[in-house]
Amino acid sequence: MKRPVVGVIGNAYRIENRFATQMVGERNLRAVAEVSGALPLMFAGCPDITDIGALLDTVDGVVLTGARANVHPTRFGTEPDPRHGPDEPPHAAAGER
């Protein structure tokens, strides 16, 4: 069975204050691969070197990275796993008590 391909947005980073790079946290790549079973595909976060239309035609989904995710896994039909860090309590979502 073909695995879905999920794009992960890179972040601009400068190494030794000289070399411009694009990087993705391994945690995001592992989450795509190990939690969802998809194939992660890193792409540049710079719009001037990324053809967004072509990218969206290629991937099955995109991870919008940002703050650390802490949504409880039961919201996605799966059980918590200590490898993925602490999560919100199941009742902590906005509007739920």
Image: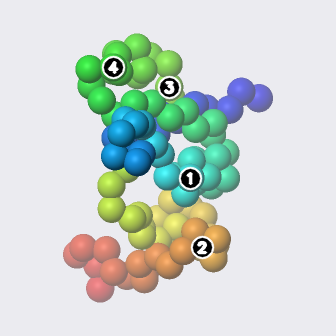
Residue 34 location in percent, x, y? 67, 53
Tell me the number on the disc at residue 49.
4
Badge nearest the viewer, 4 or 2:
4
> Can the viewer see residue 61 in this picture?
no
* Mark earlier in primary sequence (3, 1): 1
Distance from disc 4 to disc 1, alpha carbons, whole Å, reads 22 Å
Q: Residue 59 has which mark?
A: 3
In three-dimensional space, the C-alpha distance between marks 3 and 1, rounded to whole angstroms, equals 19 Å
Circles 3 and 2: CB distance less than 8 Å?
A: no
The numbered disc on residue 80 is 2
Could you tell me which quadrant the N terminus lies in? top right
Q: Earlier in the sequence, mark 3 or mark 4?
A: 4
Establish if 25 lies above or below 89.
Answer: above
Residue type, numbered disc 4 = Ile
Asked if labels 2 and 4 touch by Cβ distance under 8 angstroms, the answer is: no
Relative to 33, 19 lies left or right = left
Q: Does residue 77 appear to the left or right of 96 in the view shown?
A: right
Residue lying farthest left?
Answer: 95
Query: Which residue occupies the extreme bottom position in the image?
Result: 97
Q: Quadrant of residue 37?
A: top right
Q: Earlier in the sequence, mark 3 or mark 2?
A: 3
For label 3, the SS is loop
